[in-house]
Image (cartoon, grey):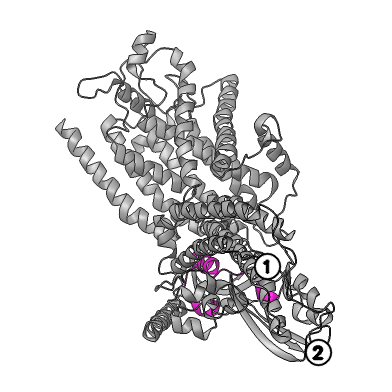
């Protein structure tokens, strides 16, 4: 893996040196292109400053922080149950998944375990958040590459999942449903059957997208071999989630560390891809939506009876200590490092979001690519602005 | 261009001012109708409605029955918008660019025959009885269709925006690359028809025979199917429609050379884009689908021949039908495929389409001599 990246870098350096000589003779100079903060490809306020030579990127630097909302600081003036309202907004497409690691960290500090039914419901909603999240990615990928039709299918079929999340939690985008010790409510009547239908819709959507996009020769020509991230480089930049699994690293927190969630009770598979290019990242995500459908269907069938809340005090005070809990969110590893001094509010919360690390590899991976590939790579790395800036 | 060709062009009615003002006015209004109506029709039918049905939505429904007045609303919206010149724009170039693009469309529409005598400037010097035509219609049409490149380059350069500049340069490279397969694909038709006159090509399709059977004439799509596919692919690229819309590339270059345009100038660009789609479809139906003619056996049933005055009436309708058929394909492809990267589409033009069209010309030439 190292050899490949070294050769790639050396080839790039050599080509740059050759071109620099030509440029000196011709007295041409590069162009600085500001991709963002307002730009259709960044779906948010990400800014990428790219030094261009013609259409080739010599150097690219992501500039983050245009949407910094200070959630880490804000959590210090919120009580523990109030924090879920804030962290919902970090990765706004998979909101429920943001709450889970924070609640798990608090439960770990308080030494509480949620009852099995609550764990199942958490896992179901966590996977539904993944479905809602990644279906939109699959549609958006088409838009970034110029095919505008898939995104409408994505919005249409994602709707079924959002309806299920809404009917269970009352919140469409920001469920605010997870509680320390369990979940807020039990599932409404008829929810299980409806969810199964919604999951079937998502499966159909995956098949449609596979036919429409992944089988398309132009799509493959645009994504295969573009933005290759070798496993060692990816690991050294802290990539997580589908981005690192697409580089062939078999690493999934759902399987490796399923504390407080019911992933160990179902039969499922972690998908990896050896290539590490944009196609691999997209393909792994497609398979993960299908795997999420598998997980949800099995969990719906095996939903245990019983309470949905453990015994927790009315006023929640977390005992002194610190805990780091991370889960496999739709974008990758999301973790909360919670430090408590025993009060009503956290003393300090550090939020580790996936997109921030996934974005940090852009200077490396964008070097030497062409401007259209910048968009492909950004789309396939898949970031949410709120998840970068928090 | 040889001097004789220039003389020929100058002696044709488009350039020799011998018409009365009323006739001129009628022709100008006619060209306007031929450009604006198909543009509006295809935009409503395909861009608003067909694509909506493809994407499981309804499209515009509020303005008029089934949203049919939506176009007027769009025009009104664009006319109300602020007319912005970027601070560092080259104002003259920036202002003129959309009209250059539109002019290319008008000039192209002017030579397309819609019936035996229903046309604006046929550039033909033949007489209808002999069906032997001398003319330069094809030559002129392919020449003026390239003028739009200049307008797009003007827009890209004049906007003083990096995105526009990149879009303009990509467009120039792409349009020049796809001009060649476009021309070479038509050469096969010209060889087979033995004339450069568009009217002559229509007549030779009517009078053609398939192994002695003249019932449907000989639409050149049957013999020049390779040319037809190359032509349609090149048209798709000339129009910068997906999968060849790298110059626009709204997800990376914002909208390429259109980025800085607002209001009326944007509207002109918009009309030019969809009008040229329609006009290229007219050209393709003349070259490959028999133009304004209906199959000869239908003519026999109706008791008319190809010189009948009726064709000046039904010819435009036949052409409109064929145009809608071809633009349907254009937009169908547009809304289905992702886009090529510009180096890929250049490679596609130079390494696949151009050699293929050269082979097509060679085979056509050999068969023309053999039969």
Res B121 seen here: no
The x and y percentages for residue B132 are 30, 22
Quarter holding the N terminus of chain A is bottom left
Mark 1 or 2 closer to N-term?
1
Can I make out residue A76 in this image? yes
Q: Residue B165, position in %: x, y?
A: 56, 61
Residues at marks 1 and 2 on the same chain = yes
Image x and y of residue B37, in percent: 58, 30
- Residue range in magenta is A362-390
Q: Confirm whether the magenta stretch covers residue A3.
A: no
- SS label for mark 1: loop
Which is closer to the viewer, label 1 or label 2? Answer: 1
Number of marks: 2
Q: Quadrant of residue B159?
A: bottom right
Q: Chain of mark 1?
A: A
- Identify the mark at residue A342; answer none if there is no mark: 2
Q: Which residue is mark 1?
A: A306
Of A76 and A222, the residue lying toward us: A76
User: How many neighbours does mark 2 have within 10 angstroms: few (below 14), some (14-19), or many (20 or more)?
Assistant: some
Q: Is residue A252 above or below residue A198?
A: below
Instruction: Tell me the element at label 2.
Output: loop
> Magenta stretch: residue A377 in it?
yes
Dominant secondary-structure state across the stretch colored magenta: helix
The residue under the point 36% across, 48% down is: B180
Instruction: Say if mark 1 contacts mark 2, CB within 8 Å.
Output: no
In this view of the protein, which residue sits in the foreground, A280 or B145? A280
Q: What quarter of the picture does the C terminus of chain A occupy?
A: bottom right
Give whichever of B8, A16 is nearer the camera: A16
Of A174 and A155, the residue lying toward us: A174
Q: Residue furthest left?
A: B370
């Amino acid at each position: 893996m190292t050899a490949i990246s070294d050769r790639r870098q050396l080839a790039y350096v050599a080509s740059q040196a050759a071109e620099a000589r030509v440029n000196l003779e011709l007295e041409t100079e590069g162009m600085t292109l500001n991709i963002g903060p307002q730009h259709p490809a960044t779906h948010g306020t990400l800014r990428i400053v790219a030094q261009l030579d013609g259409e080739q990127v010599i150097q690219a630097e992501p500039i983050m922080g245009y949407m910094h909302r200070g959630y880490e600081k804000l959590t210090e003036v919120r009580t523990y149950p109030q924090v879920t309202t804030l962290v919902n907004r970090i990765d706004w497409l998979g909101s429920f998944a943001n709450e889970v690691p924070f609640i798990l960290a608090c439960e770990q500090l308080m030494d509480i375990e949620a009852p099995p039914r609550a764990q199942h419901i958490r896992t179901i909603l966590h996977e539904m958040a993944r479905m809602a999240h990644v279906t939109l990615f699959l549609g958006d990928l088409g838009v970034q590459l110029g095919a505008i039709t898939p995104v409408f299918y994505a919005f249409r079929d994602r709707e079924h999942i959002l309806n299920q999340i809404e009917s269970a939690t009352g919140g469409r985008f920001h469920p605010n449903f997870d509680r320390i010790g369990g979940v807020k409510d039990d599932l409404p009547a008829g929810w299980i059957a409806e969810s199964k239908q919604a999951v079937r819709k998502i499966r159909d959507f995956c098949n449609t997208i596979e036919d429409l996009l992944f089988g398309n020769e132009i799509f493959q020509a645009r994504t295969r071999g573009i933005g290759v991230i070798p496993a060692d480089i990816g690991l050294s930049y802290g990539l997580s989630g589908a981005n690192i699994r697409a580089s062939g690293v078999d690493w999934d927190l759902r399987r490796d560390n399923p504390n407080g969630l019911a992933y160990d009770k179902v039969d499922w598979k972690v998908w990896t891809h050896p290539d590490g290019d944009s196609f691999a990242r997209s393909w792994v995500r497609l398979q993960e939506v299908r795997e999420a459908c598998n997980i949800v269907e099995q969990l719906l069938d095996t939903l245990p009876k019983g309470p949905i809340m453990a015994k927790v005090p009315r006023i929640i005070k977390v005992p002194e200590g610190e805990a780091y809990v991370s889960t496999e969110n739709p974008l990758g590893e999301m973790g909360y490092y919670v430090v408590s001094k025993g009060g009503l509010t956290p003393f300090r919360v550090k939020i580790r979001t996936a997109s921030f690390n996934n974005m940090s590899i852009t200077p490396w991976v964008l070097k030497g690519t062409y401007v259209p590939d910048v968009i492909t790579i950004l789309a396939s790395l898949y970031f949410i602005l709120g998840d970068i800036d928090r | 261009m040889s001097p004789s060709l220039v003389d020929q062009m100058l002696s044709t009615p488009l350039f020799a001012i011998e018409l009365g003002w009323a006739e001129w006015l009628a022709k100008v209004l006619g060209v306007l109708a031929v450009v604006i109506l198909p543009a509006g029709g295809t935009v409503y039918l395909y861009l608003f409605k067909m694509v909506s049905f493809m994407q499981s939505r309804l499209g515009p429904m509020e303005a008029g029955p089934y949203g049919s007045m939506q176009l007027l609303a769009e025009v009104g919206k664009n006319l109300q918008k602020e007319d912005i010149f970027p601070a560092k724009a080259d104002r003259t170039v920036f202002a003129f660019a959309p009209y250059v693009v539109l002019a290319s469309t008008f000039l192209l529409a002017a030579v397309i025959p819609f019936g035996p005598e229903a046309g604006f400037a046929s550039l033909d010097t033949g007489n209808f009885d002999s069906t032997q035509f001398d003319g330069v219609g094809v030559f002129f049409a392919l020449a003026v269709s390239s003028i739009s490149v200049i307008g797009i380059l003007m827009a890209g350069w004049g906007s003083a925006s990096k995105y526009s500049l990149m879009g303009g340069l990509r467009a120039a490279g792409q349009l020049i690359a796809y001009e060649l397969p476009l021309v070479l694909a038509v050469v096969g038709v010209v060889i087979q028809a033995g004339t450069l006159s568009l009217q002559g090509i229509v007549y030779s399709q009517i009078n053609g025979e398939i192994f002695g059977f003249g019932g449907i004439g000989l639409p050149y799509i049957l013999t020049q199917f390779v040319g037809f596919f190359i032509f349609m692919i090149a048209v798709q690229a000339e129009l910068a429609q997906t999968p060849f819309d790298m110059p626009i590339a709204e997800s990376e270059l914002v909208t390429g050379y259109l980025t800085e345009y607002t209001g009326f100038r944007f509207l002109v660009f918009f009309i030019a884009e969809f009008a040229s789609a329609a006009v290229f479809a007219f050209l393709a139906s003349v070259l490959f689908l028999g133009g304004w003619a209906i199959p000869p056996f239908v003519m026999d049933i109706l008791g008319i021949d190809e010189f009948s005055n009726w064709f000046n009436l039904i010819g435009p309708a036949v052409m409109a039908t064929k145009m809608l058929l071809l633009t349907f394909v254009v937009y169908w492809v547009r809304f289905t495929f992702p886009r090529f990267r510009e180096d890929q589409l250049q490679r596609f033009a130079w390494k696949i389409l151009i050699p293929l069209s050269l082979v097509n010309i060679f085979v056509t030439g050999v068969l023309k001599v053999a039969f």
